[in-house]
Image (cartoon, rainbow, N blue to C red):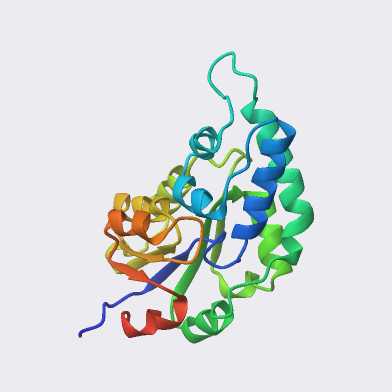
Amino acid sequence: MSKTKIETLVFDFNGTIINDVDLCLDILNKMLVSANHNTVTKEKYLSIFTFPIIDYYVKAGFDLKPGGKDDFHSLAITFNKLYSSQYLNCPLFSDVIPTLKKYFPQKKMILLSATKQEELLKEAEYFGLTSFFDNIIGIKDIYGKSKLEEAEHFFSTHPINLSSTLFIGDTIHDCQVGKKLKGQTCLVSRGHQNRSILEEAKSTFLLDNLATLEEYID
């Protein structure tokens, strides 16, 4: 099998680099209980998680329709506060550092996340990732709407060949962003969405982990 020539790697963060699914599920269930809603199982979480985050909250059981009893702004603040105080206990996936070391500095590497920019920079620094990335790109707020706008702005202002750029993530949103920008896409089935959902996205590659990435790209 011939390998795909890739010059730039664009990594998602949550669920791709940091193994934070259990933490996010725990925080979600705490918020559901606090709002007098039923909790969800991990299986259900992996089937309902999506972007924008407000849609996933509705699927989880929050009443966010106009006049509903729950408030998305308050939920976003609560999640951000709880996550910020606990993500330090989450591990990186074991193949992350070896993968970054393999391609650094031969390839341009970018971190692109729907995490607020300031928080993303802090998290990347804590995990010792900053030096691997040429650019670290987050979004402007805590509402997890989409990272497409930031991605479009970045790539429209930087001379990067998108046809040889690989967008790597754990959700169909990562694939949608990559396809929108005319790049290659790679989904890793170990994060915030289950494999059956990822299969529907029809990414260029669908992997179980990052360790096998070298089998597909050059």
Name the residue rendered at 54%, 62% in the picture: 15
Residue 115: give x, y in percent of width and height: 60, 50
Vertical arrangement, residue 159 with respect to residue 78, above or below? below
Vertical arrangement, residue 118 with respect to residue 12, above or below? above
Residue 12: give x, y in percent of width and height: 50, 61
- Residue 141 lies in quadrant: top right
Q: Nearer the viewer, residue 37 or 27?
A: 37
- Residue 37 lies in quadrant: top right
Q: Quadrant of the C terminus?
A: bottom left
Q: Check the image and name the residue furthest to the top.
A: 67
Q: Quadrant of the N terminus?
A: bottom left
Name the residue rendered at 54%, 38% in the picture: 60
- Residue 142 lies in quadrant: top right
Residue 83: give x, y in percent of width and height: 72, 51
Q: Nearer the viewer, residue 170 or 26?
A: 26
Residue 154: give x, y in percent of width and height: 45, 52
Vertical arrangement, residue 96 with respect to residue 154, above or below? below
All told, the count of numbered labels is 0
Name the residue rendered at 67%, 34% in the picture: 75
Left or right position of 186 against 141: left
Q: Nearer the viewer, residue 53 or 182?
A: 53
Name the residue rendered at 51%, 56% in the picture: 192
Q: Nearer the viewer, residue 214 or 23?
A: 23
